[in-house]
Amino acid sequence: MSYQATHLFDALTEINDRPRPFETYTAENLWNDEHISKKMLGFHLDPDSAPASRPHAFIHQSAEWINERFSLSEGKHVADFGCGPGLYASRFAKTGAAVTGIDFSKRSIDYATSEAKKQGLSIEYLLGDYLNFQSERKFDLISMVYCDLCPLSPDQRQHLLSIFRDHLAVGGSILLDVFSLEAFSGRQETADLGFRFMDGFWSPGDYWGFMNTFKYEKAKVAVDKYTIVEPHQSRSVFNWMQFFSIESLTREFEQCGLRIVEKYADVAGTPYADGEVFAVVAERI
């Protein structure tokens, strides 16, 4: 076998290799890549697109429910973790609540800051990894929407839930949604590839893209592993996803001194029912 063939065989073997759950964390690189972050912001701002945010009609409905359910108004303090370009934070701020948005995408934070200024909204946007969040402020509501807890490893989730607990005001609430075991059952292990895979999403130049989806039955984890091969480099991006039952999420919350007090089908207050997503409200024990 020639050197070129051996090298190609080894490269393809590595591309299709099954990683250990959560062994590599690439989220920050994904959201701050110059080309990809521009694409992601476009998805956020497309009112009918779902890859980065839910459709805007749902966001509007959801924010209205959240504003009413948690009585957001002047004097209330809200922290929106993973705020992106401020689609929820801006709607919270219009109630008069003091809002802090945290995200590690510079492009999203820059956009959110600019939009808040245009709309005359006083929102504190913080650029940084919310796993490192520290503040003297206590919040009446901590929100994390679009299943942002799910890409985190068990240790990261425990750390973040502890941050939530430590930053809750007396009587404060946490609202977040997660993917369910029903969603896990619907996932399939797949492999796909293509030239300029996903219509040029991964790079402005030419590349070959590979996607491998792996499932881990015992852990209830799945990953979409993307390998991008360009003329000058090869890189991999791992989109991890933890799936939960009410019982498993309850255990994780309780380990961090939190108690789930309400459950819904989504973050718009739809009554709880079996589905691919569910939402919970939690408070300090």
Image (cartoon, helix red, strand yellow):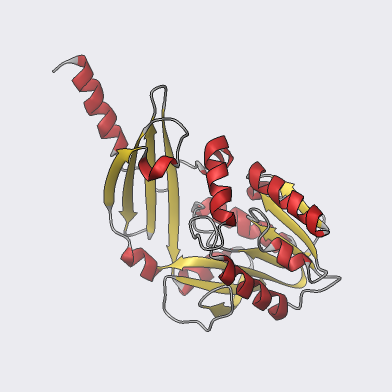
| Residue lying farthest to the right in this orientation | 75
Q: Is residue 115 left or right of residue 227?
A: right
Compare residues 52 and 158 and report the one nearer the observer. Answer: 52
Residue 276, position as x, y percentages in the image = 42, 70
165 over 240 or under it: above or below: below
Residue 196, position as x, y percentages in the image = 37, 37
Image quarter of the C terminus:
bottom right
Residue at (38% x, 23% y) in the render:
231
Q: Is residue 238 left or right of residue 36?
A: left
Residue 118 in view (yes/no): yes
Residue at (56% x, 43% y) in the render:
37
Q: Is residue 228 left or right of residue 166?
A: left
Image quarter of the N terminus:
top left
| Residue lying farthest to the top in this orientation | 3
Q: How many marks?
A: 0
| Residue lying farthest to the bottom in this orientation | 271
Residue 188, position as x, y percentages in the image = 28, 58
Compare residues 42 and 12 and report the one nearer the observer. Answer: 42
Residue 174: quarter of image: bottom right
Residue 23 in view (yes/no): no
Compare residues 81 and 152 and report the one nearer the observer. Answer: 81
107 over 43 or under it: above or below: above
Residue at (73% x, 62% y) in the render:
90
58 over 190 or under it: above or below: below
43 over 146 or under it: above or below: above
Compare residues 250 and 275 and report the one nearer the observer. Answer: 275
Residue at (65% x, 65% y) in the render:
143
Residue 157, position as x, y percentages in the image = 55, 56
